[in-house]
Amino acid sequence: MVDCVETYRASAEGRDLHDIELTYANRLPTVLEANAAAAAATSTEHRLVKLAQIIKRFLRELPEPVIPTDFYESTVSLAGQTDPSKSNLLSSVSS
């Protein structure tokens, strides 16, 4: 089983990530390319680390944050909420 937190925290080779980004900057990989890349990778975990690193880089480079600045604090607060009676908080954050 893959540890998602460790996969997200792990680092991939910067050169590998750069090569992948350049190759697929404007297109998706073909089936043959995807199969070849899967065969070349050393393990599923290694491929997942690369994917996680590419997603993190993509999110960092967005011109606007995924969670708007105005909603950040309330979103973080909501994420930590475990009380089911406060489920109405979601509607107050999204409106």
Image: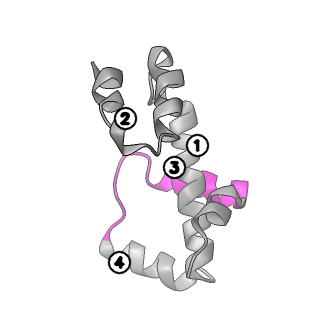
* 19 left or right of 23 in image: right
Disc 3 designates what residue?
Answer: 55
> Which residue shows up at 40% across the image and 73% down it?
33
Real-space CA distance between mark 2 and mark 4, rounded to the nearest whole angstrom: 49 Å
What kind of element bears circle 1? helix
Q: Nearer the viewer, mark 1 or mark 2?
A: 2
From what the image shows, is residue 54 above or below residue 73? below
Disc 1 designates what residue?
Answer: 57
Q: Earlier in the sequence, mark 2 or mark 3?
A: 3
Q: Is residue 18 magenta?
A: yes
- Place of residue 25 in the rendered image (x, y in percent of width and height, measured from the top left): 44, 46
> Which residue shows up at 58% across the image and 43% down it?
57
Real-space CA distance between mark 4 and mark 3, rounded to the nearest whole angstrom: 22 Å
**Foreground pick, 72 / 60:** 72
**Foreground pick, 76 / 87:** 87
In the rendered structure, find residue 32 and report the number of the disc placed on it.
4
Q: Earlier in the sequence, mark 2 or mark 4?
A: 4
Find out whether the residues at labels 4 and 3 contact each other: C-beta distance under 8 Å. Answer: no
Disc 2 designates what residue?
Answer: 86
Please, what is the three-letter code of the amino acid marked with disc 3? Ile
